[in-house]
Image (cartoon, rainbow, N blue to C red):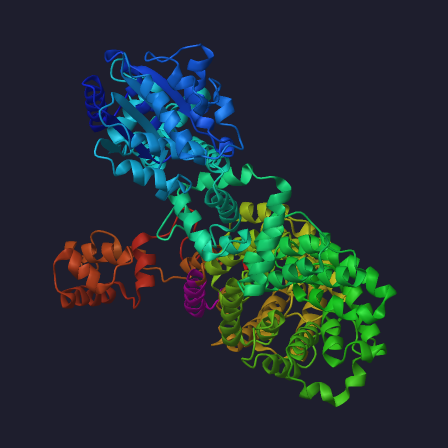
Amino acid sequence: MSSGQPLLHRDVETAAMREALSRVRAGGPSVLLIQGSRGMGKTTLLNAALAARGEVGALLLMARGHPTERDHPFGVVRQLFEPLMTAGRAPPSGGSSVVGPDLGGGDLGGGLDRGHPVTPDLLHGLYRATRSFTGDRPLIIAVDDVHHTDPQSSQWCSYIARRLDGLPIAMVLTTADTTADSGGPDDLVRDLAALPYTRLLRPAPLCAQCAARLMESVLGGGKETGDEIGEEVAAACHRLTQGNPLLLRELAGRLGRSGVRPVRAELPRVLEIGALALTETALGWLSGSGSGVDAAGVDLLRSLAIVAPEDGMEVASMIAGHGQDTARAAGETLRRAGLVTGTPPDRFAHPGIQQAVLAGMDPGERDRLHRRTASLLYRLGAPLRRSARHLMSAGPTGDPLTVTVLREAAGEAAARHSWEDATGYLHRALAETDDQDTVLEVTAELGAVEKHRDLPACLRHLRTAYGRVRMAPHALMSLAPFADILVTANSAEAAEVFAGAAESAAAAPQFGGADLLLVFAAQALLWGRSAGRLGLRRLGRSLGTLVSPAAREFLSVLALATGARGRSLPRTLAQTRRCLDGQGPVPAAAVLPLVWGDRLDEASYWAERLVSETQEAGSGTGLALALLTRAEVRYQLGSLAAGLADAEAAVVSARECQAEGFHVAAAACAARVLVEFGDLEAAESALKSVAPYGDWHPMISGQALDALGRLRLAQGRPRDGLLTLLECGRRLTAAGITNPACVPWGTNSILAYVLSGERSAARMVAERELELARAWGAPTVVARALSAGSLAHEGRVRLDMLHEAVALLGNRGARLEHARALLRLGIAQRQAGDDGKAHETLALALRLAADCGAGRLAALADKHRAATAPARAAALVPGQDDHVLTVGERRVTDLVLRGMSNLEVATTLSISKRTVDTHLARIYRKLGIHTRAELAVILTGLSDDDPPAGEPVPTGPHEYL
């Protein structure tokens, strides 16, 4: 470094140097020992002292120690004297002192050769030669990095320094802080520090203000240019470099070369560059020092870069192969260098340091350390994800232990529902082995994970595994992880695989057992395969005593299959309740049979449980199915807004895991609710986003087609709707799904036939649907068939069917179906001329439809109810004083019509609730009414589109939606 560099924060050191030079000028000795850690500016201070030697006219002898020259005897002494001897300069007192026999006859090499012992005569001869140069001027002996000198030269420095009394000689030496850098000659420092004319200087780190000024000087900024370093940036750089001048200069230089301005907006980038500068500079120091502790520090730093941030110095020292004492000393060296922090130091001072260390390592060495760390952590019993992280960072080696660790880590990740991590570990495990049995096992494990997040990938792995199993039946167990309704409901191909697997398991029970057979049979049964073909008869009566998870899953699918065929409601419910015993997770297939069986309260409870469990499990595919199930329950309960929210959330989940079948079902569910809302455009958009036909379960296609047919009817396209509904029925019937509780395509087709003018066909369908519904026995399903079937009849038959439907729906919880039946009954009563009963029935229908949020039904109910209201509008005609409302009564009625309660009206008008009650009683008496609904009809009058009270209202078939 040149002496032209600014000396910042060095007032004490500068004063000490002036004092030393003054003492030499006066003929006395002086020793300046500048001690500090690397980069602290020792050489800068040395150069500053030498630059001032002209003031005293001193002769300069200059040398510099280096780690590679420690084995060269008298290497530093040669550097000091050889320039003068080469120039032929003789000391002023005569040549004998220099060229005497002690120094080899005028050739330093003769007396200082490698094999010459360090004798008192040799040291004294060198002393006399040094003293001889002070005859006509002072002498300055400067040695930079004296801690790197060879032992002989170090001995000479100590020898001559102790003999400077009365001589105008100044020695200026720089040395490392031995407590920080471990490697300096401690004996020399102690000898020199004990001398009365020695001044020990320890340059301190720069303060933040001086750090900013130093960086500005390097960057060419400052107050003069208006390009100052921001206070926040300066403070951050000061913290990172610990005020080390060399590191600050290096940082500033790199900022200048990279074009990054030291401003607040660029602070992250500034610190990133600073971390790289600090790392590369400090590693250069440590690698080139020749110190064992420094070398250990490099090893430790690289090991820490591998294990951090999850592990610290303890694991890093084991990876580096150093004992506790060496690791402690090396860690302290790293801390003083600013690379690590903490007490004890166990983490990087900045994340960029770790990245810089890793980037600077040889890839092969980095991989070796990662594998060594993974093996150590595995043996120590650390969490498997930590071992797996290191194995994933290293290249494949084909080590069986690697496969073992990764598989175990995947299992641990799957237990935490970290599907992405588990998938990554298993992918890597497949890359580590060529053993076919192991590959099959890992493929099965991978499929079990990916069914929760990436269904197409799961199906690809199923094909791979099945291809292997067909050649090796003993590996049948590897298909078990794939056997799940999440997979099978979305793939007919998977159903075929599991049907074949069930037959194989039944034929070769030694390869599995009852549970394995039940696992495969459940998935095949879901698609309509018979129990006999699946080999379940061999289980006999023992099936009823099985309580394993596989048996519970099988029972849930069996209940679903039994219910879909419309057989024996009691048996279906018994099977469902057996698998819902509270032990283990809720089987996804167990809720729908409760819905079909008219047990909506139970279904709602278990649907909530199912959603909660799948949310905790983090399964995207499972959540899609759970939300679909709850959406269906909420639709049947008449909670349309909540059902729509579940359906839309199911669409999102199904898209994320690419479960196309669940996506179709969710879109159909959403469209069905949107039709009830009267938002036909949104319903059309929802159904256009999916295709109704695909590789998924027939019931999913049935739901999509039924929703589309329903939409077409609402759009006034009955023929299109009828064709769609008939196709829906054809597909469901072909799949053996004949229960009208599953998909109400039959009851919807009755309306389609009526709207198309085919009333006789409508009656035939109505009779068939009612027969199927009564055979199933669920009251709500029977009521739905009666309600829809009434559209194909007239007069008393229609009324009787609707009365029975309404009676069956009372207190069943199916509010939407109840509102629809009441609407149809009210219209039928009005057509029969019974406006009084019709008005009451339609008011109930309106209230239920409004509670459900079924805007389309509510609008129809309100229209017909208004037409059947008592003709009392004349009561409000001015001039009829006995019926005219007072101003106060008008105020009350206005607020009541806004939906306020009596108490809210009282608060708004600043009157008592009792006064409001009195006003309402008087209003009801004047108008001859009894309810708020009647009040609304009378006071708001009839809309422009409504016919006057008492006149007939057109009631085409479309009015029955």
Q: Is residue 736 above or below residue 349?
A: below
Residue 122 is situated, as x and y percent measured from the top left of the image, at 42, 29
Which residue is found at the position 44% from the left and 55% from the top?
A: 325
Q: Nearer the viewer, residue 675 or 471?
A: 471
Q: Quadrant of the N terminus?
A: top left
Residue 590 is situated, as x and y percent measured from the top left of the image, at 61, 73
Q: Quadrant of the C terminus?
A: bottom right
Residue 168 is situated, as x and y percent measured from the top left of the image, at 25, 20
- Residue lying farthest to the left in this orientation: 911
Which residue is found at the position 74% from the left and 89% from the top?
A: 541
Left or right, 386 with reference to 873: right
- Quarter of the image for residue 151 reads top left
Which region shows up in magenta? 830-851
Left or right, 661 with reference to 385: right
Q: Is residue 510 above or below residue 469?
A: below
- Residue lying farthest to the right in this orientation: 471
- Residue lying farthest to the top in this orientation: 88
Q: How many marks?
A: 0
Task: Specify whether residue 822 is in view.
Answer: no
Q: Nearer the viewer, residue 762 or 812?
A: 812
- Quarter of the image for residue 773 reads bottom right
Task: Specify whether residue 633 is in view.
Answer: yes
Query: Magenta residues: mostly which secondary structure?
Result: helix
